[in-house]
Image (spheres, rainbow, N blue to C red):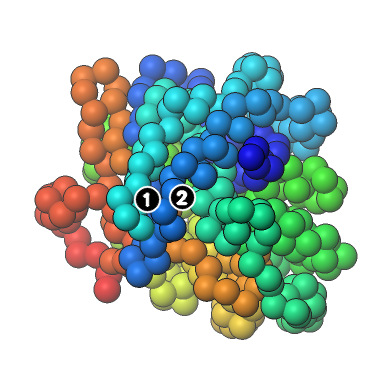
Amino acid sequence: MAHTPIIKDLCDTDLYKFSMGQVAFHQFPDVQAVYRYTNRAKEKGYRPGFAAEVREQVELMAGLRLSEEMFEFFRLRCPWIKLTYLQWLRQYRFNPEQVLLSQEGGELQVEVRGPWFETIYWEVPLLCIISELSRKNPATEAMIPRSADWAERITAKAKAMAKGEIHWIDFGTRRRFDFDTQNEVCKRMKPFAPYFRGTSNPYLAMRHGINVFGTYAHELVMAMQAIYGLQRSNERAMEHWVREYRGDLGIALTDTLTTDVFLRSFDRFYAKLFDGIRQDSGCPFAVGEKYIAHYEKLGIDPRSKVIVFSDSLDTQKAIALAQCFKGRIKTTMGIGTHLTNDVGHPAPNHVIKLVALDCGNGPVSLLKLSDDTGKVTGNEGLVADAIRTLNIQPAA
């Protein structure tokens, strides 16, 4: 029987897929990309026939298109989106042939191949599909039941953070339990503005009349490795970003090749130009201190800058971080799984990463070192060469 589509809107994704997508569209139209799925929870396998279930959902995405509502939302609420790109986005359609799916026992293999400016949009909805399908009965489409108090816990978290004067954003699209859960998060947290700043999901931002946030992800820095090499990839990512956005979307991501390597490129020019940084691995307290010291070394008042913490945050950790840095540097918390998948069941731990880019001379393999060894991607030889080339050791 035909099943209900899980992804019902082209913009039910993360905003940074569009902000990076515009860069790829305008500046790298001839680049070919390869993405690959990794299930970090090795003990969790998928049921027989799961790949076929994912395939059905992928095929259903072919009919999605940018709605007039979302076109107007982007035009009015995201002025950094250029009209040339927005008009192209109106014509964009997901191409299911770009998604390669197979299964060996409980192990799911997913690859996405094609032009970077087209394939960039598959990552987040594919993760949503895999997460949601894994919680559904394939015969009835019924989700496994959520805990009785899951919705009340959303409100309790919002109250606790607002009481502590914490600023936070919903970052929970990619690992949500299902769409309805994330929708409820936005609905229940909206009254707690301005402490609740909004969501990374453009469709839900439009639906609830809240702000949407998102700049760039590890993907951009990884792509620059293929074009400019490891040592220049952070700087070139920022350079292309500035060329596209001229001061908008001013949050830089720090840990693709470790924070220490990023700091070599984050000189006074970029440190003054960008509004702040996003911390996504390592000890957030140590990284925060490192950035305060770096800004002070450059003669920049840290209180004029912001750190967006986004690594596995929960309510208490968010409060502790905000208290630690209060009056020293501005903070915002990007909270994902703790908001959109705290429903009484273990949350998935999986990613889809850009693994290769072909700029015309054959595919170049890419890697991410991170400040946590558990988040490193890339084959062992590539990682070892990168550590030697960059003269670093990844943090434990």
The reply, left or right, for residue 84 in relation to residue 274 is: right
Q: Position of residue 125 (x, y in %)?
A: 57, 43
Where is residue 231 shown, x and y percent of the image?
24, 43
Mark 1 secondary-structure assignment: strand
Q: Is residue 384 left or right of residue 164?
A: left
Mark closer to the chain start, 2 or 1? 2
Where is residue 345? Give x, y as percent. Answer: 57, 74
Give the residue at x 75% y 48%: 204
Amino acid type, callout 1: Leu
Residue shown at 45%/25% (left/top)?
97
Q: Which residue is mark 2?
A: 50
- Residue 256 can be seen, yes or no: no
Which label sits on residue 108? 1
- The residue at the far right in this view is 191
The answer to whether mark 2 and mark 1 are in CB contact below 8 A is yes
- Quarter of the picture containing the N terminus is top right
Which of labels 2 and 1 is toward the front?
A: 2
Using the image as rendered, state which of residue 176 and residue 43 is in the foreground. 43
Nearest the eye: 242 or 349? 349
Residue 304 is left or right of residue 97, and the answer is: right
* 145 over 17 or under it: above or below: below
The amino acid type found where label 2 is placed reads: Phe
Q: Residue at x 47, y 77 (%)?
A: 285
Per the model, the C-alpha gap separating discs 2 and 1 is 8 Å
Q: Label 1: how many residues lie within 10 Å, few (<14), some (14-19) or many (20+)?
A: some
